[in-house]
Amino acid sequence: QVQLVESGGGLVQPGGSLRLSCAASGRLLKVADMGWHRQAPGKQRELVASVSSGGSTNYAESVKGRFTLSRDNARNTVYLQMNSLKPEDTAVYYCNAAVYVRFGVLQDYWGQGSQVTVSP
């Protein structure tokens, strides 16, 4: 089994910063892409940012220039630094990872979700 353990999140005022972390562990060979999605009340889940095992990143237009995704391959961990937060960033943030659980077998895993609330 593979687990994704998230940390960070919470309540912050507009303009503030938060950092989310997500670590993959368990019976895995290699972690491929990792990233974060979010889901606000009444809305569909959307991609926030992703990073390949080689370090190539992809960001949603709404977070470009404010959020930074980084990765520590030795620890199978990603970090989402969120700056200049806006009320519209309020959502449950979910870590996601594509994991090779054995040679040639790639499976998708999700974290438990972390609440981020941006409010005065």
Image: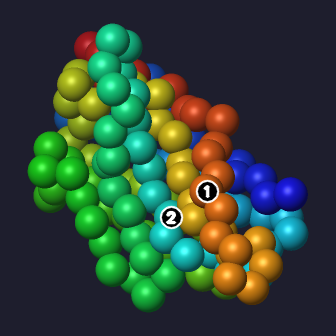
Tell me the residue at 66%/36% (across/down). 112
Residue mark closest to the camera, 2 vs 1: 1
Query: x%, y% of residue 97?
Result: 57, 60
Tell me the residue at 23%/22% (across/down). 87
Residue on which disc 1 sits: 108
The vertical placement of 110 against 13, above or below, is: below
Q: Residues within 10 Å of mark 1 (few under 14, many from 20)?
A: some
The vertical placement of 49 against 115, above or below, is: below
Query: x%, y% of residue 39?
Result: 39, 28
In the picture, the quarter occupied by the N terminus is: bottom right
* Front one among 72 and 51: 51
Query: x%, y% of residue 74?
Result: 67, 84
Is residue 66 among the parts visible in the rendering? no
In the picture, the quarter occupied by the C terminus is: top left
Label 1 element class: strand
Number of marks drawn: 2
Q: CA distance from mark 2 to mark 1?
A: 10 Å
What's the amino acid at mark 2?
Answer: Met
Residue on which disc 2 sits: 34
Query: x%, y% of residue 119?
Result: 30, 16
Is residue 92 among the parts visible in the rendering? yes
Tell me the residue at 79%/79% (across/down). 102
| Residue 116 position by quadrant | top left
Q: Is residue 32 left or right of residue 81?
A: right
Label 2 element class: strand
